[in-house]
Image (cartoon, rainbow, N blue to C red):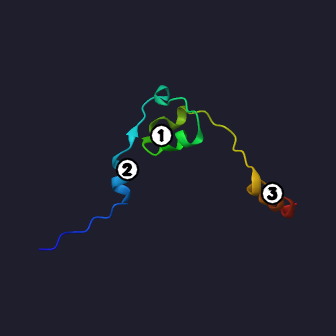
Amino acid sequence: MKMKKESGNSSRSARKGLTVVKSVSEIPDFRSDDEIAAWYQTHSTALIQDQLESVPAQVGGKLRSRLAARRSKKN
């Protein structure tokens, strides 16, 4: 009898380990971008998205110069 081969990177298994955040107070203060990224890989804020503060996006480095060039071509 042959066994089914399981894929280790299925999206179903990835979602299974998420902790659902139910209030803004459950989100800790982070010390670094790496800490933020690691936390969001294991937590979902989908239920409280409307309670989170919006912040403007910031663009820097090579992306900033490419964006500026694209905007000048349009004008």
- The residue where tag 3 is placed is 65
Question: How busy is the neighbourhood of tag 2: few (under 14 within 10 Å), some, or many (20 plus)?
Answer: few
Which quadrant of the rendered structure holds the N terminus?
Answer: bottom left
Instruction: Give the side of residue 46 with respect to residue 1, left or right.
Output: right
Instruction: Give the side of residue 45 with respect to residue 4, left or right.
Output: right
Say whether marks 1 and 3 touch (CB < 8 Å): no
Q: Is residue 57 above or below residue 64?
A: above
What SS does tag 3 mark? helix
Residue 72 coordinates in the image, percent (x, y): 86, 60
Say whether marks 2 and 1 touch (CB < 8 Å): no
Residue 15 numbered tag = 2
Which tag, 2 or 3, sits closer to the chain's start? 2
Q: Quadrant of residue 18?
A: top left
Which tag, 2 or 1, sits closer to the chain's start? 2
Question: How busy is the neighbourhood of tag 3: few (under 14 within 10 Å), some, or many (20 plus)?
Answer: few
- The residue where tag 1 is placed is 39
Question: Looking at the picture, which amino acid does disc 2 mark?
Answer: Arg
Q: How many marks?
A: 3
Farthest residue, direction bottom: 1
Q: Residue at x 36, y 60 (%)?
A: 10
User: Marks 2/1: CA distance?
Assistant: 14 Å
Question: Looking at the picture, which amino acid does disc 3 mark?
Answer: Ser
Which tag, 1 or 3, sits closer to the chain's start? 1
**Front residue of 53 and 42:** 42
User: Marks 2/3: CA distance?
Assistant: 37 Å
Residue 68 coordinates in the image, percent (x, y): 82, 56
Say whether marks 2 and 3 touch (CB < 8 Å): no
What SS does tag 2 mark? helix
